[in-house]
Amino acid sequence: MADIRVPTLGESVTEATVGKWFKQPGEAVAVDEPLVELETDKVTLEVPAPAAGVLSGIAAKNGDTVAVGALLGQIKEGAGAAAKAAPTPKVAEAQKPLPAAPTKPAEMPMPPSVRRMAAESGVDPSKVSGTGMHGQVTKGDMIAAIERAAAAPTPVSAPVQMRAPSPADDAAREERVHMTRLRQTIARRLKDAQNTAAMLTTFNEVDMSAVMHMRNQYKDLFEKKHGVKLGFMGFFVRACIQALKEIPAVNAEIDGTDIVYKNYYHIGIAVGTEKGLVVPVVRDAQLMSLAEIEKTISDLGRRAREGTLRIEEMQGGTFTITNGGVYGSLMSTPILNAPQSGILGMHKIQERPVVAAGKIEARPMMYLALSYDHRIVDGREAVTFLVRVKEGLEDPARVVLDL
Amino acid sequence: MGYDLIVIGTGPGGYVCAIRAAQLGLKTAVVEKRATYGGTCLNIGCIPSKALLHASELFEEAGHTFEKMGIGVSAPRLDLKAMMAFKDQGVDGNVRGVDFLFKKNKIDGFIGDARIVAPGKVEVKDEGGKTQTLEAKSIVIATGSDVARLKGIDIDEKRIVSSTGVLSLPQVPKHLLVVGAGVIGLELGSVWRRLGAQVTVVEFLDGALPGMDGEVRRQAQRLFEKQGMAFKLSSKVTAVDTSGKRLKVTVEPAKGGTAETMEADVVLVAIGRVPYTEGLGLKEIGVKLDEHGRVAVDHYYATNVPGIWAIGDVIAGPMLAHKAEDEGVALAEILVGQAGHVNYDAIPNVVYTYPEIATVGKSEEDLKAAGVAYNVGKFPFTANGRAKVNLTTDGFVKILADAKTDRVLGVHLICADAGNMIAEAVIAMEFGASAEDIARTCHAHPTLPEAVKEAAMAVAKRAIHM
């Protein structure tokens, strides 16, 4: 028997939700063949078969939460078994329950005080580490756990809104789907950001003529030399970094009663995927050429859609750019990617009549939005930042000359 | 003759250690200098004193309480000789029990004085002076303790007695003077008071039962005084004149000052016990003792000499039979590579007077000294239904719990049957229970232990019957 266990999931990720099993008990599997999908806060990954043989049992089913190292299932080894197993799986053996995944070492009954406190507080004693005999959770452990829970920054800990039941003829036409882990994390983080930051948005618009002109002029040459298409993102990243250098508060974050200013520029690029939004990070973008930035973004975007980003590639951003324009958005108020203090919203480029030098002209225009944390970014700073971004895009020479 | 283990001494520590070791597959021998097994506890301590306490308590009840319950008997008549025979019978049954257990576990017993001549070698000298040398991989010193003596006062076990002699007085003394208001003095003082003696207890410190919870000590002393025991506190006995028909006892204030003379028929010296290591040859083979003359051991009961171990009264800690037993089990398990362990924070201590006094864990004084914030829950037996009908309403239950975590830190009982009732408190503490856990545990009605539950509720100021 070979155990199928939850692999290491990366920094600060300790548990995952079991997704789809690709194989059913009794089916033959080859070594390294994907067996089951695991979803974490950040990524979805596939667990390969550790050995060839027959999947003899499943210990954690779809929807279960499992810790790193927990038993997922077992494989009965042997190639012979694999050959004949497929047509008539031995049901009796396949259904045999496996030993439970290792959760808590000792399942001691809860003392009466702990049972009461669990019912009253909603704190789950099975998630509290016990100091009593054989790891039993004592009243003292429970008091400490409830205090910790109260101290944790979860201001939205109001009881979960239970939905009123639907009328019977509607209920049949509703579909209830469990939120994926990624969706739950997105939901929680967005709401946390709203509840924490003093968030507001300032707008401006940018005439994209110069950038589009440059792009049209050099795109073939650029692609030939660098092997990547010349897009707009590189210009935006460069323009933002220059503006961030001038207005450091937008690249800072709050830590307790301190403000942490970051003299490096890890720019997060929001990427929409089938499963939701992920934000891979272009690290030290201030050291990169425009071509390097374009290449990095292209690679991260592709892997984000494939779901093969590593956790660390999504951590540590200091500022974020999100582009709703790809879906046709004309204007939006992005939500901060906490604990960052600024996020730039790009939008659709649209030809609009613009008055230039006394004449009305059609120009490719884009609205820009900067949502910022007013706790540390002043209105003047936010507006100046956005004006600098606008200037850098309308006159790319300013970015080149660092003006 | 090679053994895995030789245990010197067959008191509760030694015999239990030997049996546990034999259970775990060690070839085990014991050496005992007394003619019978069981040590002080079975022969001249716990067991015979409990026989006399039980008999004398019934004697007193027959004389005082029966009538109140409608049992008409003429005044009970004491047959001391028969009572002593009853006591000896109890002792005999117990020591033979140990003999049986040794045989059952194939433990070889040797009667004689043991001396450790070298690590792994024990010389046994029998009554006739013949010696033989036994060999073993491990030797356990479980030689226990002996009566502590008072300077200048010779114990003859006739008129000036220790805890041994006081168990076999040929007649009830008119006046028994007890030196020391500790467990032994109060228990045996109670026995002879019930049988008709006038009892005076002289104590060096300012109250009975030093070391126990203050409130319990005060309550106990009040009750003993009500029963007719006299206390002379902050006083010391400096001399006993044995020349006359009655003893002339010189009693001085503890701090010095004018002495007074008290007459007594018997003086019981009960000022404590000292570790017993005489004749073992420890000095010769270099086994270290601590500053109190106890065998120094580490966390695993090992002495400084490899292969020599020690448990019970002869090492540090309370001199209690059950403490020694638990150490015996722990050591046997350690010797075979298991994780033997004794939790010294949850060792009960019982005084078998009436009412009994039983405590486990910390006293209020301990907690105050340690700066621990605590809550107190108290419940008197005057509010306990069973105690009321039994006419045993003396005493109370007191539970001390951590102010923050509600964890039980100490339980103090003074009541009838306290010695049996303390067990639930010890288990609760061993499992780290909170007062609320005891309060939410169902207790049978009508029983005395309901008072424990009520006291636990009283910690949160929610006792029902008060």
Image: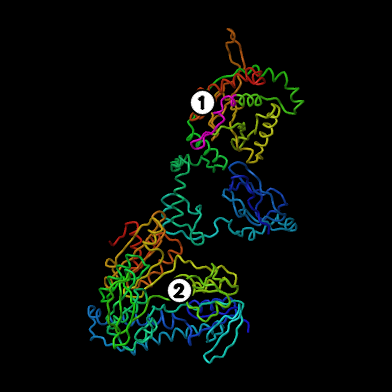
The quadrant of the image that shows the N terminus of chain B is bottom right
> Tag 1: residue type?
Thr
Q: Residue at x 34, y 56 (%)?
A: B460
Say whether residue B61 is visible: no
Q: Which residue is mark 2?
A: B322
Farthest residue to the bottom: give it. Answer: B128
**B274 left or right, relative to A354:** left
Tell me where residue A168 appears, x and y as whole percent. Answer: 46, 42
Q: Residues within 10 Å of mark 1 (few under 14, many from 20)?
A: many
Corner quadrant of residue B148: bottom left
The quadrant of the image that shows the C terminus of chain B is bottom left
Q: Residue at x 61, y 15 (%)?
A: A363
> Relative to A340, does residue A232 appear above or below in the rendering?
above
Farthest residue to the front: give it. Answer: B257
Tell me where residue A374 appears, x and y as whole percent. Answer: 49, 28
**A188 left or right, relative to B266:** right
> Which mark identifies residue B279?
none
Q: Secondary structure at mark 2?
A: helix
**Viewer-side residue, A263 vs B310:** B310
**Viewer-side residue, A34 vs A84:** A34
Tell me where residue A136 appears, x and y as whole percent. Answer: 49, 59
> Tag 2: residue type?
His
Please report the bounds of the magenta region as a residue range: A243-259
Tell me if residue B423 is in the magenta stretch.
no
Q: Which residue is mark 1?
A: A201
Identify the chain of the residue marked 1, using the numbered disc in the image. Answer: A
Identify the chain of the residue marked 2, using the numbered disc in the image. Answer: B
Q: Secondary structure at mark 1?
A: strand
Tell me where residue A202 appears, x and y as whole percent. Answer: 52, 23
The alpha-carbon separation of the residues under discs 1 and 2 comes to: 75 Å
**Viewer-side residue, B81 vs B419:** B81
